[in-house]
Image (spheres, helix red, strand yellow):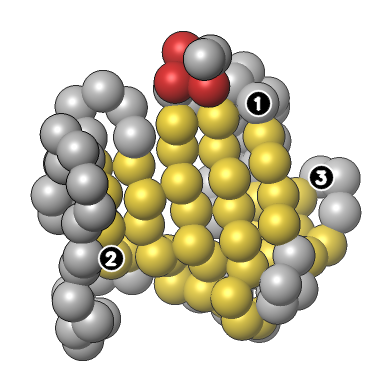
Amino acid sequence: MPPLPPSGSLKIAARDWPSDSETLSLIDDARGYRTMLWRANPGPLGLLHAHDEIEQIYVLDGDFFDDEASYGPGDFVLRMPGTQHRAGSKNGCTMLITYMPLEGTKG
């Protein structure tokens, strides 16, 4: 999983999903930028928690829910830093998740 490039573009070639992981990390940068594909099994996905970064979730397939709503393929969820949440999936799902530090949004 490479960090962000200093400039230009970065291509990550398509590859098989690791058999020993439900997460495929695409970007993990020391400045707090992270992007991953996450395959969630049915059931609860965690306890009540919050992130220090902006969390963005795009549901690729399956179903996903939190305390506020249920989501399906094509739905997008944005959570600002400090937003308390817990989540789960009734039937399993695959999501593209990105984390970005709030400072990175100021321009």
Quadrant of residue 23 within the rendered picture: bottom left
Image location of residue 9, percent across then percent down: 24, 53
- Alpha carbon separation for disc pair 2 and 3: 26 Å
Image mark for residue 80: 1
- Label 1 vs 2, first from the N-terminus: 2
Image location of residue 73, percent across then percent down: 70, 77
> Which residue occupies 61% across, 61% down?
58
- Label 1 vs 3, first from the N-terminus: 3
How many other residues sit within 10 Å of disc 2, few (<14), some (14-19) or many (≥20)? some
Residue denoted by label 3: 67
Quadrant of residue 12 within the rendered picture: bottom left
> Which residue occupies 59% across, 53% down?
57
Of helix, strand and loop, which one carries label 3? Answer: loop
Residue denoted by label 2: 24
How many other residues sit within 10 Å of disc 1, few (<14), some (14-19) or many (≥20)? some
Above or below for 55 versus 81: below
Kindly indicate whether the residue at mark 2 contacts the one at mark 1 (C-beta within 8 angstroms).
no
Mark in front: 1 vs 3: 1
Quadrant (top left/top right/bottom left/bottom right) for the N terminus: bottom left
Say which amino acid is labelled 3: Asp
